[in-house]
Amino acid sequence: MFVPRHQLIVERILGSEYAHTLTRFIGLLEILMAVWILSGIKSRLNALIQIIIIGSMNVLEFFLAEDLLLWGKFNIILAFILISIIYLYEFKLKKSSVCC
């Protein structure tokens, strides 16, 4: 709502007809993901889904909406750093006896 850039990115990638609704839906899904992260339930599955979503979203934005990104093409480097942190924490540093 306060950052129309997000809606512009959604418009560029998915079309303008439902961009407003889809942007809000994506925001809701982000909130639900945060609740899932905080719950600690199936944290490895959660991490894998985060990695896939962050990676695919940033590749799409890199090629289709680079001019709308806050840091332009540098965003993909920041996404890689975030993916690396998620991976290292969940699969290397965190001690877990139960998979997924």
Image (tube, grey):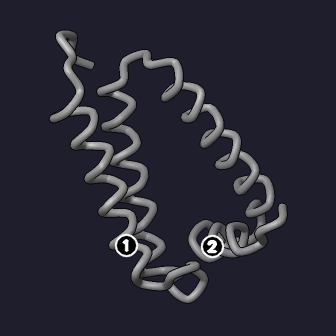
Q: Position of residue 36 (x, y in %)?
A: 52, 25
Q: Is residue 28 left or right of residue 45?
A: right
Q: Contact, CB < 8 Å: mark 2 with mark 1?
A: no
Q: Residue at x 56, y 89 (%)?
A: 67
Q: Position of residue 81 (x, y in %)?
A: 31, 61
Residue 82: image quadrant is bottom left
Q: Residue at x 30, y 63 (%)?
A: 80
What kind of residue is marked 2?
Answer: Ile
Q: Position of residue 76 (x, y in %)?
A: 37, 72
In which quadrant of the rendered image does the N terminus lie? bottom right
Q: 81 above or below 88?
A: below
Q: Which residue is mark 2?
A: 9
User: SS class of the residue under badge 2?
Assistant: helix
Q: Is residue 39 left or right of residue 48?
A: right
In which quadrant of the rendered image does the C terminus lie? top left
Front tag of 2 and 1? 1
Q: Residue at x 42, y 50 (%)?
A: 53
Residue furthest bottom in the image: 67
Q: Position of residue 28 (x, y in %)?
A: 70, 40
Label ID, residue 66: none
Q: 42 above or below 57?
A: above
What kind of residue is marked 1?
Answer: Ile
User: SS class of the residue under badge 1?
Assistant: helix
Q: 16 above or below 66?
A: above
Q: Which residue is mark 1?
A: 76
